[in-house]
Amino acid sequence: MGFLLQRYLGRRSRLLPRALAGSLLQPLPAAPSARPPGARLHSTGISGLQERTLIAVKPDGVQRRLVGDVIKRFEKRGFKLVGLKLLQANEGILAEHYHELRRKPFYHELIKYMSSGPVVAMVWEGHNVVKTSRAMVGETNPAEAKPGTVRGDFSVHVSRNVVHASDSLETAQREISLWFRSNELIDWDCYDQKIMYEP
């Protein structure tokens, strides 16, 4: 293309001022990017916007085909899914996950149950996602969980309460690093965040 343009301008150099002919042969400047590479869509200064939490559908939830229902609730709430895996949890990871419960009388039954079938582990990101997720999941005892929460709608017994949710930001960070390697979490731009959070 540049060669043809040079031939064209060479034949008609008397028709164009020298400065203009030279400028036509210069490469065009790159168009400005909408945002710098790696820039986050939601850098709005809203605190807690990029919080992450671990949500895990327990074996009873997976067996009862409730994974889709749980995902749907978090998506409809506006949170962003950044990690997802189906796995058979071994006793090693469960012992670390439930480390604080190791002295409880139900600990061994809990580990046995959680290793009895597949678990779906997820990482969700969003504004105050840790606190909001706990409210969405409901009380540990389904008898105390309000209708509209995951446990209030789907669970019937405290030992089969469908889902786990991190209870604090610090716990979430620990649990996420336990269940996911850093390269298993996807940092991507969810464009509805622009609608919700940017001025």
Image (cartoon, rainbow, N blue to C red):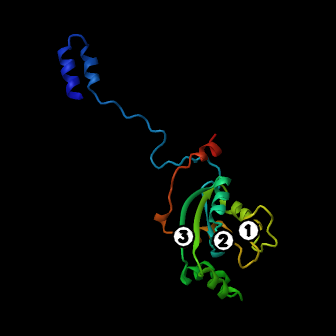
Which residue in the structure is indicated by mark 2?
64
Label 1 with label 2: CB-CB less than 8 Å: yes
Gap between marks 3 and 2 measured at Cα: 15 Å
First of labels 1, 2 by sequence position: 2
Gap between marks 1 and 2 measured at Cα: 10 Å
Task: Name the residue rendered at 57%, 58% in the picture.
Answer: 81
Task: Name the residue rendered at 62%, 82% in the picture.
Answer: 99
Q: Is residue 148 above or below residue 20?
A: below
Which residue in the structure is indicated by mark 3?
86
Residue 15 coordinates in the image, percent (x, y): 24, 10
| Quadrant the N terminus occupies | top left
Residue 54 coordinates in the image, percent (x, y): 61, 67
Instruction: Tell me the quarter of the picture where residue 109 sits.
Output: bottom right
Gap between marks 3 and 1 measured at Cα: 20 Å
Which residue in the structure is indicated by mark 1?
154
Looking at the rendered structure, the secondary structure element under dot 2 is loop
For residue 120, which numbered disc appears in the image?
A: none
Looking at the rendered structure, the secondary structure element under dot 3 is strand
The nearer-to-camera label among 3 and 2 is: 2
**Identity, as a three-letter code, of the amino acid under mark 3:** Leu
Task: Name the residue rendered at 63%, 60% in the picture.
Answer: 71
Using residue 151 as the reference point, say whether residue 24 is left or right of it: left
Residue 139 coordinates in the image, percent (x, y): 77, 70
Using residue 147 as the reference point, say whether residue 111 is left or right of it: left
Instruction: Tell me the quarter of the picture where residue 49 sits.
Output: bottom right
